[in-house]
Amino acid sequence: MLSAVAASRARRPPTIPASGIPAEEEARVTADRFPMRNTPHRYGAVAMAFHWVLAIAVVGLIVVGMIMTDLPPSQRTFEIFQLHKSIGFVVFVLALGRLAWRLANPVPPLPDGLKTWERGAAHLTHYGLYVLLIAQPVVGWLASSASTLGIQTVVFGVLPLPDAVSPDEALYERLSALHGAIGWAFVALVALHVAAALKHHFVLRDDVLRRMLPGTRVPPRRG
């Protein structure tokens, strides 16, 4: 009797959830769409999180940075400056984390068929973005430290940052100009990066953009 029950259970088809996909297949698809680490054909969830959080933060910093310098002195302006510097500190920390993660997790290779100069431009754009992500917050911190206003940077009103240099108006002017120049370099590289991603998606019709989008399924590379 028991053997008959066991045989009946063994012949029972696998349970299919409401999605219509067997549980094992659904788990495999989920793992393929949301791998934690990078794979040869797509970025992992950690790299995606670093990428999109940094993208949103950088765009926000650029927009606010263009606006806040023309605001009249007020408590509100002071709070906006402090928020700008706080988010800049977060960008610096995240950029270091993303760089460490990239070094530990090889990124998917570029698509076959790209010209040598296109590959070179892609690599230079990525390296340039990493340099700016780290350099810009540092230059901003140095400029804030050199300001003769004597206003300390307090990250989100909780973590005070020490001044890196002594107050010096001439140094402040030079560092502020450099900070602005790096900001415009950021605008140029981000625009180039976005334009290249859109070209890959709509013109070349490859997987370069999709492999950085959460929830998309990217087929393994052939060969």
Image (cartoon, rainbow, N blue to C red):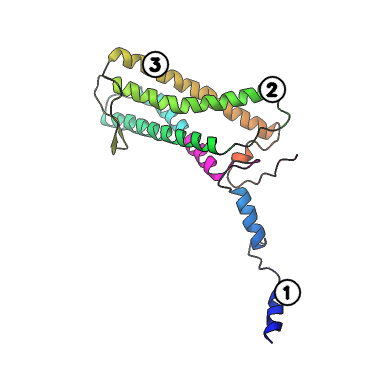
Label 3 amino acid?
Answer: Ala
Residue assigned mark 3? 177
Query: What is the x, y in percent for residue 180?
Result: 42, 19
Camera-near label (3 vs 2) is 2
Labels 3 and 2 touching (C-beta < 8 A): no
In this orientation, which residue lies closer to the viewer: 106 or 95? 106
Could you tell whether 187 is left or right of 117 in the image?
left
Residues in magenta?
Answer: 38-56
- Main SS of the magenta part reads helix
Q: Is residue 45 magenta?
A: yes
Residue at screen point 70% across, 83% down: 3
Residue assigned mark 2? 116
| Label at residue 11 | 1
Counting residues from the N terminus, which is met first, the one under dot 1 or under dot 3? 1
Label 1 amino acid?
Answer: Arg
In this orientation, which residue lies closer to the viewer: 27 or 147? 27
Considering every residue shown, the one lying at the far bottom of the view is 1
Q: Is residue 100 magenta?
A: no
In the image, residue 198 sits, relative to residue 219, either above or below, namely above
In this orientation, which residue lies closer to the viewer: 65 or 164? 164
Spatial CA span between label 2 and label 1: 57 Å
Element type at mark 2:
helix
Quadrant assignment, res 108 = top right
Quadrant assignment, res 157 = top left
Counting residues from the N terminus, which is met first, the one under dot 2 or under dot 1? 1
Spatial CA span between label 1 and label 3: 75 Å
Residue at screen point 50% across, 24% down: 187
